[in-house]
Image (spheres, rainbow, N blue to C red):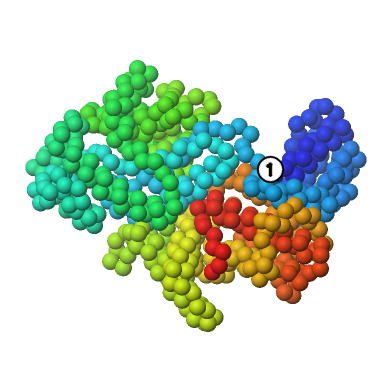
Amino acid sequence: MNATQEKLKVQLEQAIVAAFGADFAGVDPILVSASNPKFGDYQANVALSLSKKLGKQPRAIAAAIVEKLDVSEICEPPEIAGPGFINLKLKTVYLEAQLNAIQTDPRLGVPTAKTPKREIVDFSSPNIAKEMHVGHLRSTIIGDSIARILEFQGHDVLRLNHVGDWGTQFGMLIAYLREVHPDALTKANALDIGDLVSFYRKAKQRFDADAAFQETARQEVVRLQAGAEDTLHAWKLLCEQSRREFQIIYDLLDVQIIERGESFYNSLLSGVVEDLEKSGLLVENQGAKCVFLEGFTNREGEPLPLIVQKSDGGYNYATTDLASLRYRIQQDEAKRIIYVTDAGQGNHFAQVFQVARKAGWIPDDVELVHVPFGLVLGEDGKKLKTRSGDTVRLRDLLDEAIARSHAELKARLQEEERQETEEFINEVARVVGISAVKYADLSQNRTSNYIFSYDKMLDLKGNTAPYMLYVYARIQGISRKGDINFEELGNNAVLLQHETELALAKYLLQLDEVISSVEQDLLPNRLCEYLYELSKKFNQFYDRNQGVQVLDAQEPQRTSRLVLCDLTARTLKLGLSLLGIQVLERM
């Protein structure tokens, strides 16, 4: 809730008590943004909800509230509409004062969190010896954006990359490489990542078909767990090889993340099982140690257990996730732990969270959040694949976006008869291509699947990153054309006279509300929607036919409108940075 809405809410709550008595203290005035500008800026719907309790008509209740309501410093006189809606329209002088107040504020009026917390965002999570593919796109981009927003709000954020770097697959891969490419287990960079992935596939095929090889692979796992020097060295080389490849992607996406893989929690796994046994939660089932959970059943309707130790004594993902959860609470002292994974893991995390709560590991002041997301689909509506049916490599997807952006920019420059350096073209193509991919993902409600289309995401029109980057660059073009240094405008009085100025001003002042909502609900698409609407409001303000003159306007309107331009550009730059998107001064 933004500062203005908060003030109005408090005034309405006081008016309700003044009108109907102390018994009505704490009644929610149900204050929302007006759906139609002709009804004002805000609308309180509380009168309808109080009608039954008070035994009065909603309009009469609304009239009694308005009689006690003092919002004269913020709003025009309140109006009652329909069956009892209280409509509130912000005063122009109030809007001007609010804009004047944020001009020199680098945070543009957005306050930091009242109670900053230690928060963990667990995202990306690729597997060692495999390449990052399109399936890692959403977790990486959504997780990074959530982390950026929480950091901006003043929270102490730990960005964790829970990579798959342990388990049977390493015994399998090391055993196979001992036979076909032993150098890869003793020398750094003996293989490139493509060869490593190919060997992994062949090792998996061999493992599935050859019982003797299965036993050899299991022995390598035992050696790895026991810390055998040669096996451990081989494992480290494989991890380092994959880590370098991951970093190329993270650098391209401008993502900062700390790796803490499954192997980090190895020494804690036995303690998880022991503590669950002490708490009386463990049940032995077909040789495995399990916890039976409420609300989870198999197809036959039988209770579905969460296995924490397999019949052969080994551990699994659930054991590791329970160990990591305890570590994050006890050692990292996190108060909110956010897991950004595909929706298909929803049941897994619900089960892990339930076991941890039953065991008494989750303090009352710790919040666990699974942030699910849908699939990336091809234009045929099916999972995005290559023509050969393989999963799309993330590096290929990003390179293709940059290449298409490069081609479109070259075509546009030729059409406009513009000459630019190759360095300029490459940089713009990189920023636009990566930004287009990020924004196309983040602008969707993360819980839904979405169709991946280069043509749509690179379009200069519509709800796309290139459209907003163009609006930002357009404002910088105003400063160049008028030889204006926005930073030297200082704290000049904003005067709002034209309807497009008022509409833009009101929208600029909603930034804090939007960021606050994303901080709570972890839905970055809300910030995308805000930035898109802000871009449209600016274009309406600057439109030649319906908008206003800026550089050719007379003072004091000229400077006032330049301030509006600057505030818009700074809001776009800030908002896009929270999505992990870089702006361009020229396009």
- Give the quadrant of residue 568: bottom right
Residue 73 x/y as whole percent: 85, 44
- The residue drawn where x is 48% and y is 66% is 428
Q: For numbered disc 1, what is the local secondary structure? A: loop
Binning the other alpha carbons within 10 Å of mark 1 as few (below 14), some (14 to 19) or many (20 upward) gives some
| Residue furthest right as drawn | 67
Residue 572 vs 9, above or below: the answer is below
Q: Residue at x 62, y 65 (%)?
A: 476
On screen, residue 173 above or below 472: above
Give whichever of 520, 352 is nearer the camera. 520
Residue 141 shows up from this direction: yes
Residue at 49% across, 74% down: 420
Describe residue 236's horizontal placement relative to residue 3 as left or right.
left
Name the amino acid type tagged 1: Met
Nearer the observer, 300 or 439: 439
The residue that mark 1 highlights is 1
Residue 373 visible in rendering = no
Instruction: Identify the residue at the far top of this view.
Output: 278
Task: Determine the image quadrant of residue 273.
Answer: top left
Residue 456 percent across, percent down from the top left: 50, 68
Where in the figure is residue 202, as x and y percent of width and height?
17, 53
Q: Tell me residue 114's x, y (percent).
A: 63, 34
In this image, 99 relative to 476: left or right? right
Question: Would you say 569 lies left or right of 522 here?
Answer: right
The total of numbered circles placed on residues is 1
- Residues 183 and 390: in front is 183
Q: In the picture shown, does residue 544 fall above or below 288? A: below
State the quadrant of the C terminus.
bottom right
In front: 155, or 143? Answer: 155
Quadrant of the rendering where the N terminus is positioned = top right
